[in-house]
Structure formats: C-alpha cells, structure tokens
Image (cartoon, helix red, strand yellow):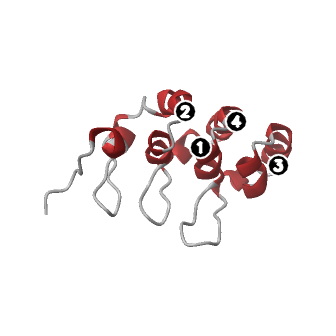
C-alpha cells in the first residue's frame, strides 16, 4: 500500500483497499512513520488522496513522527488542490507539530508556539 500510494497507482490502491481497508493506517518504517495519505500528499497524487479519504476520512488526522498531518505536508509541498480537499477540517488548520509549526507556517513564515 505504501509504495502504491507513493507512486500514485490508483488501481493498486483501490485493489488493496478493497482487500483490506485497514491498510489505510499502514506506516513507513523510517524516521517519519508516515501513512499512505502522507506519501500520496507529498507527491501530489490527488486521486489516491481521494481514495484514501473515502475509505477513512479520519486518516487526515494522522500525524507522522514529527507531528505533521497531511495538511501540513500539502501546504509545504504546494499541493493546492489537496490543501483545498483537506482544509475543511478546522482542527487540521490549527494542528501544531512538535516543532511548533502549523500547516501554513511556510506561507506566513510564523510559528505557532511562543516559548
């Protein structure tokens, strides 16, 4: 699932989700421990993002090890269509990472925490 999401292979993602919808919660084994949604977002695979969210809308709440949600990554990587898809959730817009950045920190050049 992870590789299919990273590559944007919508057919394989659909097949895997049909076989086991819980694969939407799979995690990479590297430092960031990202989900298929994180991987699809960083590469701009909107079709895969739509598939993953259709099976598990709450997957957009998942954070990687750094505390980033899919919205953080979409904003950081300039994936405007995906930002629009994810920005409907007010909790995601205000989600702060372990480094005190919010999803639009790169755009505003501001951190959220003040310590």
> Which residue is at the far left?
115
Asked if the residues shown at circle 2 and circle 1 are in contact, with their CB atoms under 8 angstroms apart, the answer is yes
Pick the front one: 56 or 44 = 44
Asked if the residues shown at circle 2 and circle 4 are in contact, with their CB atoms under 8 angstroms apart, the answer is no
Within 10 Å of the Cα at label 2, are there few (<14), some (14-19), or many (20+) other Cα atoms? many
Residue at image location 31% in from the left, 45% down from the top: 105
Which type of secondary structure does the marked residue at label 2 adopt? helix
Asked if the residues shown at circle 4 and circle 1 are in contact, with their CB atoms under 8 angstroms apart, the answer is no
Q: Earlier in the sequence, mark 3 or mark 4?
A: 3
Q: Which residue is mark 3?
A: 16
Q: Which residue is mark 1?
A: 41
Q: Which residue is mark 2?
A: 82
Residue 80 point in image, percent of width and height: 51, 30
Q: Which residue is mark 4?
A: 51
Asked if the residues shown at circle 3 and circle 1 are in contact, with their CB atoms under 8 angstroms apart, the answer is no
Which type of secondary structure does the marked residue at label 4 adopt? helix
Q: Could you say which quadrant of the image residue 10 lies in?
A: top right
Pick the front one: 37 or 109 = 109
Q: Earlier in the sequence, mark 2 or mark 3?
A: 3
């Amino acid at each position: 699932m992870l590789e299919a999401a990273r590559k944007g292979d919508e057919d394989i993602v659909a097949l895997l989700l049909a076989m086991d919808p819980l694969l939407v919660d799979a995690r990479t084994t590297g430092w960031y421990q990202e989900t298929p949604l994180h991987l699809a977002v960083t590469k701009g695979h909107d079709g895969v993002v739509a598939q993953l969210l259709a099976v598990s809308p709450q997957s957009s709440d998942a954070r990687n090890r750094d505390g980033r949600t899919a919205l953080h990554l979409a904003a950081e990587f300039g994936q405007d269509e995906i930002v629009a898809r994810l920005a409907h959730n007010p909790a995601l817009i205000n989600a702060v990472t372990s480094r005190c950045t919010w999803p639009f920190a790169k755009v505003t050049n501001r951190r959220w925490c003040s310590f």
